Image: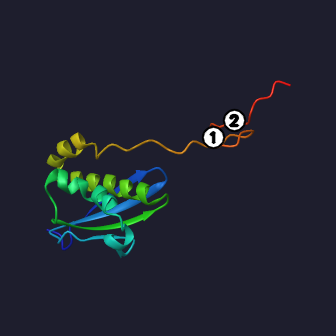
Amino acid sequence: MAALAQYNAVGRRKTSVARVYLRPNGSGKIIVNKRDIETYFPLKWRRNVIQAPFEATGTQGQFDVVVNVKGGGLTGQAEAIRLGIARGLVAFNEELRKPLRDAGYLTRDPRMVERKKYGQPKARKHFQFSKR
């Protein structure tokens, strides 16, 4: 066995990109951009989003996770990390694919912000029409 087995994966959501490194036989510690998860994501529901793949597969506390994430806001980053962790768990053990797929954690959310069009104030909003 290698000195340090590590499973890499990339997760994306909106404009956020998360590179996730899963290290088995860890203590369950999660580091995001060289900061502890509690300081990077102070809201508990965002931390729950990130830890959801571990709960779905029953692997809480078995991996140390190191994440580099950039772009977007905190919610997009959290969901990008969730996708990256799910993909990393599948790379670790292919049998975990079914519970992760059933929970919807392996699906890349394709929704992006629609671009603003010229001659309009926003993407879909229009200036008031005047016939005369």
Residue 21, horizontal then vertical, whole percent: 30, 64
Query: How many numbered circles does the render carry?
Result: 2
Q: Mark 1: which amino acid?
A: Ala
2 or 1: mark nearer the eye: 2
Residue 35, horizontal then vertical, whole percent: 36, 75
Residue at figure coordinates x 18%, y 74% from the top left: 3
| Quadrant of the snapshot with the N terminus | bottom left
Q: Nearer the viewer, residue 33 or 38?
A: 38
How packed is label 2: few (under 14 Cα within 10 Å), some, or many (20 or more)?
Answer: few
Query: In this figure, which residue is indicated by the disc labeled 1?
Result: 123
> Is residue 32 in view?
yes
CA distance for labels 2 and 1:
8 Å
Horizontal side, residue 132 vs residue 56: left or right: right
Callout 2 secondary element = loop
Q: How is the image coloured?
A: rainbow
Residue 17, horizontal then vertical, whole percent: 43, 57
Give the quadrant of residue 2.
Answer: bottom left
Query: In this figure, which residue is indicated by the disc labeled 2?
Result: 126
Residue 9, placed above or below residue 107: below
Horizontal side, residue 48 vs residue 129: left or right: left
> Is residue 92 in view?
no
Q: Mark 2: which amino acid?
A: His
